[in-house]
Image: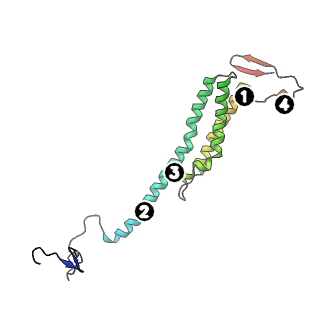
Amino acid sequence: MEKGKGLMVDGRRWAVDFSDNSSSNSTRDIPDPPGFTRASQDQDDSTLSRQKKDAESNWKAQKAWEVAQAPLKNLFMMGFMMWMAGSTVHLFSIGITFSALWQPISALQGVGKVFEPYKDSKVDLLGPKLLFIALNLGGLALGVWKLNTLGLLPTHVSDWVSSLPPAQVEFSGGGISLR
């Protein structure tokens, strides 16, 4: 090759031909590095993609359980707020109580949407969904209990029939008792 002139391959200037035209098998003379085999190279790609899918499904399962346990934190927070509101009927206690009723009801209506991002053929969502539903039902029960302590639930016959005398209410200690 002359100085200043490029190598011409297939009519293009400065193209490099990497094909091995030698008759000897020089690439086989160099041993493969430890842990590398040429036969497993194609197999490694499928193993890697399978491992990625397994890792993604494990991540989805873990996140689904985290979402399912989220109402437990809300349950403790709402219980504390209801305790702070007291047992007298006023605007704040009624607002807290109806919030305690509304949040679980709206969460139960959207169970499918909550767990939609975690749907996968390898992820079993039955357990997380059941836990999510159970914790929200616990929150609903807490709200109903607060309604009862406020005296807003119809628990006596006279609450339903106006011709009957109302129940006698006694305030003792820290609770309400009916006669």
Q: Nearer the viewer, mark 4 or mark 3?
A: 4
Residue, x 64% and y 39% (percent of image)?
A: 104
The image quarter in which residue 42 lies: bottom left
Marks 4/1: CA–CA distance? 15 Å
**First in residue order: circle 2 vs circle 3:** 2
Q: Please say whether residue 138 is visible from this viewpoint.
A: no
Secondary structure under badge 3?
Answer: helix
Marks 1/3: CA–CA distance? 38 Å
Residue, x 50% and y 52% (percent of image)?
A: 60
Three-letter amino acid code at the position of disc 4 = Trp
Three-letter amino acid code at the position of disc 1 = Asn
**Which residue position holds label 3?**
61
User: Residue placed farthest to the bottom in the image?
Assistant: 23
**Which residue position holds label 4?**
160
**Which residue position holds label 1?**
148
Residue 12 position within the rendered picture, expressed as x and y whole percent measured from the top left: 23, 77
